[in-house]
Amino acid sequence: MTTSYWLAEPFVLRTSRTSNPVDVEIVGAGVTGCSCALMLAEGGLRVRVHEAGRVASGASGRNGGFALRGGAMPYDAARAQLGRDRARTLWQLTETALTRVRSLAGDAFRRVGSLRLAADDTEGERLAREFDALREDGFDAAWVDKLPTPLDRLFRCAVVHPGDGALDPARWVRGIAEQACAAGAEIAEASRVGATELQGPIVVLAADGLLGAAGCPELGPLVWPVRGQMLATEPLGERLYERPHYARDGFDYWQQLPDGRLVAGGKRDLDVETEFTVDDATTPPIQEKLEELVTQLVGRLPRITHRWAGIWGETADRLPIVGEVPGRAGVWVAGGYSGHGNVLGLACGELVARAILGERPAELALFDPRRFA
Ligand SMILES: Cc1cc2nc3c(=O)[nH]c(=O)nc-3n(C[C@H](O)[C@H](O)[C@H](O)COP(=O)(O)OP(=O)(O)OC[C@H]3O[C@@H](n4cnc5c(N)ncnc54)[C@H](O)[C@@H]3O)c2cc1C
């Protein structure tokens, strides 16, 4: 098992551990499970979260730290897939969630925007289509023709998404976990469970890429595991990148941290088949490609201090699957963010909590598990 740069920061969760009966049991203490637990505990329910590893030890503590609005697909593609109103609803949901990230995350979040880059003219045309669709529907975005060095040597053009930002993802989720515990939730680390053995009248499965193995086999074919690999460099002597950057439709991504180090990931398209796995090991071919990317971005290869991988959950239509599991009354699922779960995970964890607390949030219809029936 690899350890991410983010998870290397020491952390001890202060939480009580009892065997008292609870109203809701949650499987998984990533962003989804912790945000769901926080809202449920604040709503007065007794909650226990079971985490096979440690808080944020799954994808939530291993990702690129991009806090992006929207879904896994560009906005114009979402409009084609969902229709204009539903796409707009999805984007608005995540913009609201980004505001909530800011209120919950403290110094783990920097609202610096994000930059989506085009590696060639064809990608530039795709960027233009997304930019036009966003602007038509009233969403903020800025077109960039003239890129600063070294981006001008590597990319054609870009779009700034001003409301996005950069997270220290493990610190962010550990912070939500602490707030959930302070609100009365219990989080049991080193507690691997299966959905069927849990006693709570309500169960929430929040295991994203590992949903199929969390005791609900019918979810396995709907959300499949995908591996993403990353690395971190030593701090660079110069500031090159002010915000998270991504290119080649998200197959390359990087951000420079406040201390100067570069965190970069992607290159999964080099070996797509082997990256459908639950094994969070790194592989030499993809790590070498990531080193090449860093060399292009920095002009030399700095010392690599951390290498890691993580597993996310992908669905056939790249939309999350969120709601009560068909045929399993009282068992809820939230996951399948298709590599885009930092903000959507918060939004969907909270949608499930609100539904359990008695609301019927309209946005749940976007992610209904029955669409795959
Ligand atoms: C390399 C990489 C880069 C990424 N980059 C980004 C990015 O920049 N921006 C973005 O928005 N998204 C990104 N993602 C996706 C994002 O990290 C995930 O979608 C999100 O963290 C999912 O959160 P979660 O809480 O649903 O699941 P996870 O964080 O995976 O948490 C699930 C937890 O469930 C636990 N678990 C599983 N089975 C059991 C069981 N049986 N019993 C108890 N516990 C169990 C696991 O140990 C795990 O801790 C990336 C993912 C990876 C891997």
Image (cartoon, grey):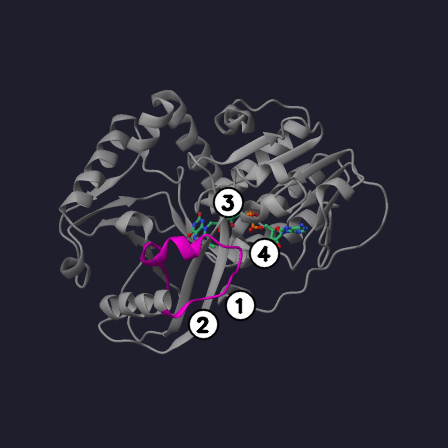
The nearer-to-camera label among 1 and 3 is: 3
Q: Is residue 317 magenta?
A: no
**Residue 225 x %, y %:** 50, 49
Q: Which residues are magenta?
A: 260-284
Mark 3 C-beta to ligand 1 under 8 Å: no
Q: Residue furthest right?
A: 20
Numbered mark located on residue 56 in the image: 4
Q: Quick one: 181 or 333, which is closer to the camera?
A: 333
Element marked by disc 1: loop
Disc 3: CA contacts within 10 A as few (<14), some (14-19) or many (>=20): many
In the picture, measured across the screen, residue 214 lies left or right of residue 241, that is right
Judge whether 67 appears above or below 263 on screen. Answer: above
**Residue 82 x %, y %:** 38, 25
Give the residue number, with chain letter if any, for mark 1.
Answer: 3
Q: What distance separates the C-alpha of mark 4 from that of mark 2?
A: 17 Å
Looking at the image, do the residues carrying marks 1 and 3 touch, with CB atoms under 8 Å apart? no
Q: What distance separates the C-alpha of mark 3 from that of mark 4?
A: 20 Å
Give the residue number, with chain letter if any, for mark 3.
Answer: 224
Give the residue number, with chain letter if any, for mark 2.
Answer: 306
What residue is rendered at 21% in x and 39% in y?
126
**Residue 8 x %, y %:** 54, 69
Mark 4 C-beta to ligand 1 under 8 Å: yes
Q: What distance separates the C-alpha of mark 3 from that of mark 2?
A: 26 Å
Disc 1 marks a residue whose amino acid type is Thr
